[in-house]
Amino acid sequence: MTSQMPAAQSPWVRVADAPSRIGQIIEVRGWLTHRRSSGKVQFLMLRDGSGVIQCVAGINDLTPAEWENCALLTQESAVVVRGALRADARSPGGVELGLSALRVVSVAEAYPISPKEHGVDFLMDHRHLWLRSARQQSILRIRAEVIAAFRDFMDGEGFVLVDAPVFTPNACEGTTTLFETSYFDEKAYLTQSGQLYEEAAAMAFGRVYCFGPAFRAEKSKTRRHLIEFWMMEPEWAFATLEDVIGLEERLLVTTVARVLDRRAADLSVLERNVSKLENVKAPFPRIHYTEAVERIRAAGLPFEWGNDLGSPDETALSSQFDRPVFVTNYPAAVKAFYMESDPSDARLSLSCDCLAPEGYGEIIGGGQRMESLERLTRRIEEHGLPQQAFEWYKDLRRFGSVPHAGFGIGVERTLAWIAGLDHVRESIPFPRMLNRLHP
Ligand code: 4AD
Ligand code: MG
């Protein structure tokens, strides 16, 4: 049933660009989302990834073979069509294509995803097809915008992109969540964070960042945890905790403003309450860990000073603000080995997490790094980590050690907040979770 497109040439136009082509004969290549027919007229809705366009063909507009083919088109069948583009206020995008040619590229089998409600497991099992739905496309378009915003922002601040390795010989964020793999005759781990390498790069370039995947064998089955997620990690030489908090604030304000500006249509598909995002203006509130403990208790949750914040604590705390909030000076005992001590209280560290509002919780973790070789050596000891594995890292303190600080921002948690998602599983194309490796 495949028919040849007549020889006449017309430009291949993306649906998103069609409104600038009214009055022209154009070609569109896409997939059928649905079709209806009134006997003598066929209405085809085509999506090409940039948008959806309504195509109309009367029985006399196509060859008899093309007309017959139309009736065989099922949802997700692929076609190339040609026609005259006209304005039509009632159609999506304000345009309609009056077909003069239709070529079938392939006819789809019965498509498993229909507009009716499907359970999450069913959709996750069909993630490779689910990506075609409007909602998933809007989420992933916003994801692309968030990533572009992160990188443009860092580049603009003079940070150099320095990639960190994925295979690593040792832990960065603690040994309990390492994914072990074999590396010829050695053991290796999938990276938990590029931070230690960025610290080395910061001593070369001054300001650096990496952007890549991170892997955590976390047994947590929450709406915030992925096994594989993407993180951007800036590291800044001669900078303090104060400096990176300012950088984080500017990064988030810029990113949210850019998504509001450029992805308004996608936010609207998601029915995101954008007035909440419009609140995201500097300055963000900053609260000391001890104040956070008081606020969590005041919210009615049992919480002991000295503990780390769990998801419910973060939810309780971040619901109290209309914009992201910084929680600073966590106890050293709940943070990684590399955190600098707080000179005003040896129990605390120069650390900071940024919690997103509306109950989303931690999206950024960061702080100032241990500067002195002696203190770092002691800390590695206290954390039960092998000194030998960190000799290269300790070299950074032997050769021109300076105060330095940085952070890691998770793409999926940031996106879940900006897009208003209730689970991170939709914020990454193919999520890897405790119970999910497929597809
Ligand atoms: O707080 P984390 O563990 O910090 C680090 O990895 C530091 N080395 C970063 C640095 O200072 N360079 O992770 C940072 C961020 C979190 O705030 C969160 O957004 C994200 O990474 N993240 C996760 N996202 C999804 N699923 C998980 N399991 C995540 N673990 C961390
Ligand atoms: Mg953290």
Image: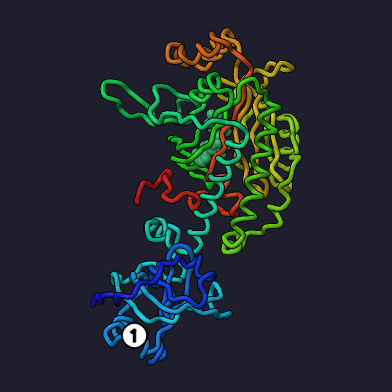
Lateral position of residue 415 relative to residue 348, left or right: left
Lateral position of residue 269 relative to residue 389, left or right: right
Identify the element where label 1 is drawn: loop
Task: Please identify the quadrant where the N terminus is shown.
Answer: bottom left
Colour option used: rainbow
Evaluate whether residue 109 shows in this view.
Answer: no
Evaluate whether residue 292 shows in this view.
Answer: yes
- Taking depth in this image into account, of 397 and 50 the one nearest to the observer is 50
Q: x, y (%) of residue 24? A: 47, 76
Is residue 212 shown above or below 136?
above
Q: Residue furthest left?
A: 1
Lateral position of residue 342 relative to residue 85, left or right: right
Q: Name the residue: 47% across, 49% down.
A: 428
Is residue 51 shown above or below 353?
below
For ligand 1, the image quadrant comes to top right
Q: Name the residue: 43% across, 11% down.
A: 388
Q: x, y (%) of residue 109? A: 29, 70
- Taking depth in this image into account, of 403 and 422 the one nearest to the observer is 403
Is residue 276 shown above or below 334?
below
Q: Name the residue: 36% across, 69% down.
A: 76
- Taking depth in this image into account, of 120 and 307 the one nearest to the observer is 120
Q: x, y (%) of residue 284? A: 74, 40
The crowding category of the residue bearing disc 1, from other C-alpha atoms within 10 Å (few below 14, some 14 to 19, many at least 20), is some
Q: Which residue is mark 1?
A: 62
Q: Name the residue: 65% across, 26% down.
A: 351
Amino acid carrying label 1: it is: Leu
Q: x, y (%) of residue 77? A: 33, 71
Report the number of numbered marks.
1
Q: Quadrant of residue 406?
A: top right
On whether ligand 1 comes within 8 Å of the CB at mark 1, the answer is no
